[in-house]
Amino acid sequence: ALATPGSNYKVIVVPATRRMPVATLQKLAALAQAGAKVIFEKLPEDVPGYGRLAERRNDFKATLGQFAPRASVNADIPAALFPHVRREPLTDTGLNFIRRRTAAGHAYFITNLTAQAHRGWITLGVPARAIILTDPVSGTTGIARRRSDDAKSTTVFLQLVPGESRTLSTFSSPVSSNIPPWPDDEPAAAPIALAGTWQITFTQGGPELPSARTTIALKSWTDLGGDEAKRFAGTARYRLEFDAPATKAEDWRLDLGDVRESARVRLNGRDLGTLWTIPFRVDFPASLLKPNGNVLELDVTNLAANRIRDMDGANDPKPDASDAERAAHPPRKANWKIMREINFVNINYRPFDASAWPLTPSGLLGPVTLTPLRTFTP
């Protein structure tokens, strides 16, 4: 038996690895010689590092020879060795996930890190009498549709576009009937671009607030003119008035397109949430739209990169600047690296200097669209 504090094991399974420290390999050899069952998915090929390389390689080769016939090499680990471990079919979908046991069943965090949208039925490796889905960005929660289940698995319908995630909770007993069903919806027509004049007002940040401006074509605020916008880090409010599309819809999906880097969304005074990750979109009921004079407000916040770039830039104050102007336009090469006990260096271990950084795109780049939605039964 293999005994550790609090646990006993029947076998050691060593996953495939190219390099392994000699001390690790020697410990495994000692356990095998003492009678432990050791299975290598693939034997290691070499030692890591270059110190005492020849000596360690000789020890490594000699230690490998001690295993036969006490250890086996098998690329396919026998499932019979792990009767308590259930294979998770989610692995075959390409979706990333984490599964944890809970008092009521299991909890999954599932995310789509691929470039393709996922839409369809998936099989979970655990049984469930009920499943609750939650969108961790919007907070939307509902009971998921289950098609079938047995003593070992459950089939559930799931839609995830690239960048989206869901928490999924399984329950071994029925849940409250007060929880609504998960809103399975799909586009009822093509996206409709929101056109018009955007009013941009810089509301918070520094080193100073750029002047307000208007634009029809959305682009980075660093490209809208003025050095103040190029060095600005903070928040700008984008405001657009528009009429509702003629298309009828049960609900609408607002898609902001490219956002650098987060946006708080308000439509006709109603807060629709803060979007901080792709996809930058939010659904809302059709009743929120008025036939005319809808007001969309987006508080968009960028990164601090352009501000840091400016603070590390050249010190070139105007010779005739007044004290008030100098106070409003602090000199660059600012002493902003005020962290205590830190060697502030770049990736090459040279003094950190951001003055050569390219400008980072900032603000709302769009395009901004509305998509009519309809519910459907998978």
Image (tube, grey):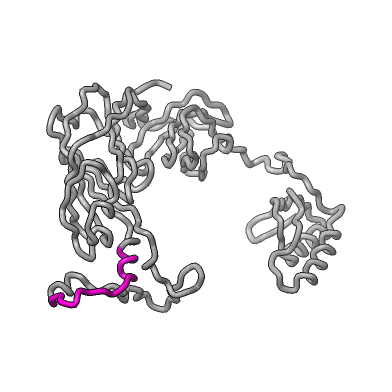
Question: Which percent across, then down, holds residue 166?
Answer: 42, 39
Depicted 304 relative to depicted 250: above or below: below
Vertical position of residue 203 compared to residue 162: above or below = below
Q: Quick check: is 310 in the magenta stretch?
A: yes
Q: Would you say 215 lies left or right of 277 here?
A: left
| Quadrant of the rendering where the N terminus is positioned | bottom right
Query: Total number of numbered labels?
Result: 0
Evaluate whether residue 27 shows in this view. Answer: yes
**For the C terminus, which image quadrant?**
top left
Residue at image location 47% in from the left, 36% down from the top: 170
Position of 144 with respect to 83 (left or right) is left
- The picture places residue 131, in percent across and down from the top left corner, at 44, 33
Q: Which residues are magenta?
A: 307-323
Q: Position of residue 342 (x, y in %)?
A: 43, 76
- Verify whether residue 173 appears in magenta: no
Work out which residue is located at the far front of the displayed protein and give it: 319
Rendered image quadrant of residue 181 = top left
Task: Depth check: give the residue in front, 223 or 69.
Answer: 223
Residue 40: percent from the left, percent from the top? 75, 51
Q: Main secondary structure of the magenta part?
A: loop
Rendered residue at 53%/34% (across/down): 124
Q: Nearer the viewer, residue 348 or 97?
A: 348
Identify the residue shown where x is 27% and y is 24%. 250
